[in-house]
Amino acid sequence: MKALRQYLDKIKPNFEKGGKFEKLHSTFDAFETFLFTPKTTSKTGVHIHDAIDSKRTMSVVVLALIPALLFGIWNTGYQHFLSLGQADADFWQMIGYGALKVLPIVVVSYVVGLGIEFMFAQMKGHEVAEGFLVSGMLIPLVLPADVPLWMVAVATAFAVVIGKEVFGGTGMNIWNPALVARAFLFFAYPSKMSGDLIWVSGLSKGEGIVDGFSGATPLGNVITGKLDLLPSTLQSFIGTIPGSIGETSTLAILIGAVILLATGIANWKIMVSVFAGGYLMALGFNAIGTTDAMNVDALQQLCLGGFAFGAVFMATDPVSGSRTETGKYIYGFLIGVFAIMIRVFNPAYPEGVMLAILLMNTFAPLIDHVIVQQNIKRRLKRVKVNA
């Protein structure tokens, strides 16, 4: 690392004002600050800083996503060989096949997203925002393994430009960019984001699929009333089921949650509130039990689809989520409630978590405003104003 630091110091003058490549200062600064902690300090006033900046925060989130990514790679291969009747295939065969399907999606997401981020930074003469370090990983993990790469590129571009840059860039966006990408694909190309065939790589090509293998997700079976085909709660928790790349394994997601909570990056209040809201809503529907969707076990509801992934990695987004302490409880609880409600009442959108989070992203500022105003009123009542 010392040699790298010396090399960067040697070429740095070329990218500063008056240097040969001064127009690429934003690009150089992005790489330098990603590799090393910036040396800049406050010039006025007294400030207390720690070693954690935005890039380090984003890096920890990406690290927390690795368990879900690795399991998604394995599960992609496992579901593929299972559909061929080769569930006993070698572990490394599954990893190899899954990597060939998943890693190109990750690469396309980062290349397109960071390319646009660098372009906007150069045009504005600003530093490159680090927000896409996380979004670039989230977008592939909420997509099916068989999604065409050109669609990944289009959705990523839409998420960065329309979902973030038009609002002013990182820290100014109203909605979670990764969910904007998924919503764009869901409504623009529904045939590639719904149905049974798209969740298992190779299934749509008919590569000798064994009889009786449908490739339907558990939520898909709920919609069609095939509750007898639902996996066990344990199987749903482990994640050996069809679904989006990073959303199937609640176990891998919770490992990521532990990393986020242990490092203080994510807020436990939102996570717990989402699970609590979803669980209580599901229990209420269990008590009514008039439809197949209502009869799905409450605990299993939390393990199906993208519920756990949304609760841990999407709802906790500090930019698009609620910021007041009381508001975090309300915001998270309503996400859980609406996610299960959408699943039960609207079979056209069985993955209710996406719409629930986007809806509450929209109302998060209103929740915070109400909480702040209530706090102000309570404090004013305690103040004695002298005439």
Image: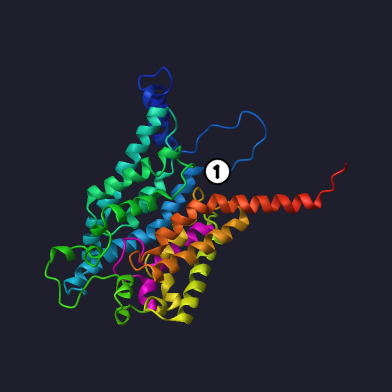
On the picture, is 170 further left or further right than 77? right
Compared with 39, 137 (above or below) is below
- Quadrant in the rendering for residue 192: bottom left
On the picture, is 49 further left or further right than 19? right
Compared with 323, 26 (above or below) is above
Q: Position of residue 301 (x, y in %)?
A: 42, 73
Residue displayed at 30% across by 50% down:
106
Q: How is the image coloured?
A: rainbow
On the picture, is 361 further left or further right than 80? right
Residue displayed at 61% across by 49% down:
369
On the picture, is 340 further left or further right than 220? right
Dominant secondary structure (helix, strand or loop) of the stretch shown in magenta: helix
Q: Position of residue 305 (x, y in %)?
A: 37, 67
Compared with 78, 232 (above or below) is below
Q: Position of residue 120 (x, y in %)?
A: 38, 33
Residue 1 visible to an observer of this rendering: no
**The magenta stretch spans residue 255:** yes
Residue displayed at 35% across by 40% down:
114
Q: State which region is magenta.
A: 233-262
- Quadrant in the rendering for residue 11: top left
User: To which residue does mark 1 refer?
Assistant: 51
Crowd band around label 1 with a 10 angstrom C-alpha radius: few (<14), some (14–19), many (20+): few
Q: Nearer the viewer, residue 357 or 103?
A: 357
Q: Position of residue 208 (x, y in %)?
A: 11, 70
Q: Nearer the viewer, residue 189 or 203?
A: 189
Q: Which quadrant would the N terminus be assigned to in this image? A: top left
Q: What type is the residue that disc 1 sits on?
A: Ala
* Secondary structure at numbered mark 1: loop
**The magenta stretch spans residue 64:** no
Residue displayed at 42% across by 32% down:
29
Residue 222 visible to an observer of this rendering: yes
